[in-house]
Each structure stands twice: as C-alpha cells, then as structure tokens.
Image (cartoon, grey):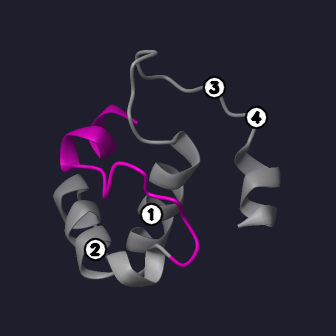
Amino acid sequence: MQKFRKAFGRLPDPRATNAKHELLEVLFIALAAVLCGASSCAEMEEFGRSKEELLRLLLRLEHGIPSHDTFSRV
C-alpha cells in the first residue's frame, strides 16, 4: 500500500468535501477489481464486498466497502 500511496497520493479528489471513503482506498479497490475482471462500478462494489476480509488487512475501510455510486463519482 505504501507504493500505491506514493504513486497516487497527490491525486486531487474530484468528490465533494463530505466524501466518506478515502480516495486511495476507492482507487485501490477499483484497480484490484479491474485486474480481476470487473468491468463496471457495480462489479467493483461486488468485488469489494466479496474480498472485504482480505482488503481489511491492507485498508482501514472505516466506512466499509464503497457503493457502486461512490465508484461512479470517482
């Protein structure tokens, strides 16, 4: 996660200031999901939910897995 944060940590967050999920966590899940074959935001959410236990070893996920709407906004 450190290398991921170094590579993407300076990206501006396009969402409103009241966004619940950390941008880097959303991007990490999206990238992992796409690498595993996801092709839509709904599939990214489904991937996150199915791998939540594993993802929590790497990410805080303070507000759980982002919804497909969150992936769409990002």
Earlier sequence position, callout 3 versus callout 2: 3
Q: Is residue 13 left or right of residue 37?
A: right
SS at mark 2 in the image: helix
Report the Cα–Cα distance between label 3 and label 1. Answer: 17 Å
Circle 1 packing at 10 Å, graded few (<14), some (14-19), many (20+), is many
- Residue 66 lies, with reference to residue 9, above or below; the image says below
- Residue segment shown in magenta: 57-74
Q: Are marks 4 and 2 in contact (CB under 8 Å)?
A: no
Distance between the Cα atoms at labels 3 and 4?
A: 6 Å
Horizontal placement of 10 versus 32: left or right?
right
Q: Where is residue 19 in the image (x, y as percent from the top left)?
A: 39, 27
The amino acid on which the numbered mark 3 sits, given as a three-letter code, is Pro
Question: Which residue is label 3 attached to?
Answer: 12
Q: Which of marks 1 and 4 is nearer the N terminus?
A: 4
What residue is pinned by disc 4?
10
User: Which residue position holds label 1?
Assistant: 29
Q: How many neighbours does mark 4 have within 10 angstroms: few (below 14), some (14-19), or many (20 or more)?
A: few
Disc number at residue 47?
2
Q: Name the amino acid, label 2.
A: Phe
Rendering quarter of residue 65: bottom left
Residue found at x 29% / y 40%: 70
